Amino acid sequence: MPPIIIAKRFSGLNNNVDPARLELNLETMVCELSQSVNVRYDDRGRPRMRKGQTERHVGVFHSLWTYQELFGYVAFDTLLYNINPDLSLTGVRSDMAGTRIAFCWTPLGIYYSDGVFRGVLIGDKSVPWVKTMGRKESHRAYSGPPEQALHMDLFANRLLVAEGNVVFRSEPNNYSLYRRAGEYNQFPGEVRMIKSVAGGVYFSDDKRTFFAAGNSPKDWVRRTVMESPAMEWSAIPDLINPKDIGMEGDDGWACWVSAEGLVFGSPQGNIIQPTKDKIILPSGFQQGAAVMDGQNFIYNMHQ
């Protein structure tokens, strides 16, 4: 008896409808799935088992971060490590607080902070992140980086740094100098995401998500784009190539996760939620972590 072909390709997971009502295109033989465990899909919708794992280091690691071609950094308890190309670890600092660390790439180095301790990573070396005046006028009141800095991103040559419900903006091209009296933005709740794109910056506090449109902070026009917040730490450090998500243009898109699922943010402040009507996420999760593997978006959630 010849095999009965149910489907040739799959469009992904859909747990929002009865499995008996999943969509099947009889012409293309493309079908949705009610369950999908340890599976990744190629660009034609063909499934493959996800690659296995090889243990390289033993311990409870946290704050794994990579950016573009960098191999990245990871922390173990109060220790901060550089990840080498062969996946070995080189220690760069040993006196961190042991909590989640925020990182941000800049042309001057990788700035980092865990809300207690901070610094600048240059290769496998850490140098202090402290106030540096440069050639600024002395009659203005300048401060160093916020002491409880956590979420960060770079926009218009300024480092945007969140402390509580306020985002402070550094002086242009000097990420260690802040004029707190005027260069800041305040939000209703605690800031949990800053993600810049070509046309502005996405912000999320613990209540909702905003977009500040404009090429410079002085020109920003802020509006609400989602009535739900981003999951903290779920934004991908790199911007997404629009062609990888079926969109046009040359400027990268932001990508993060909310309680409503996956979110793509355009350079102009428009959002797309491709899984909102297909995947129901468990409730109660406030934080997450994410990575883009080709056209597969992988994330986990925790409280």
Image (spheres, rainbow, N blue to C red):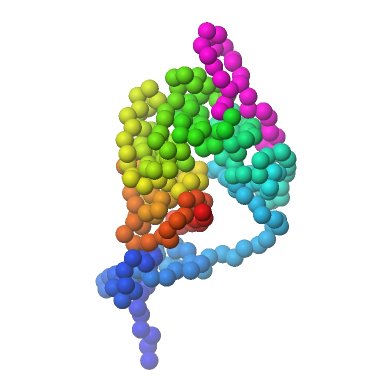
| Total marks in image | 0
- Looking at the picture, how far across and down is residue 130, in whole percent? 63, 24
In the rendered structure, does residue 129 fall within the stretch colored magenta?
yes
Nearer to us in this view, 108 or 260: 260
In the rendered structure, does residue 74 fall within the stretch colored magenta?
no
Name above or below for residue 187 compared with residue 78: above
User: Does the rendering let one see residue 165?
Assistant: yes
User: Does the rendering let one see residue 82?
Assistant: no
Residue drawn at the location 66% of the way across and 41% of the way down = 97
The overriding secondary structure of the stretch rendered in magenta is loop
Name above or below for residue 223 compared with residue 277: above
Name above or below for residue 47 compared with residue 246: below
Residue segment shown in magenta:
122-146
- Looking at the picture, how far across and down is residue 174, in whole percent? 55, 22
Left or right of residue 201, residue 237 in this image: right
Nearer to us in this view, 3 or 78: 78
Name above or below for residue 164 compared with residue 183: below
Residue drawn at the location 31% of the way across and 35% of the way down = 223
- Looking at the picture, how far across and down is residue 149, in whole percent? 55, 33
Where, by quadrant of the figure, is residue 19 drawn?
bottom left
Where, by quadrant of the figure, is residue 68 drawn?
top right
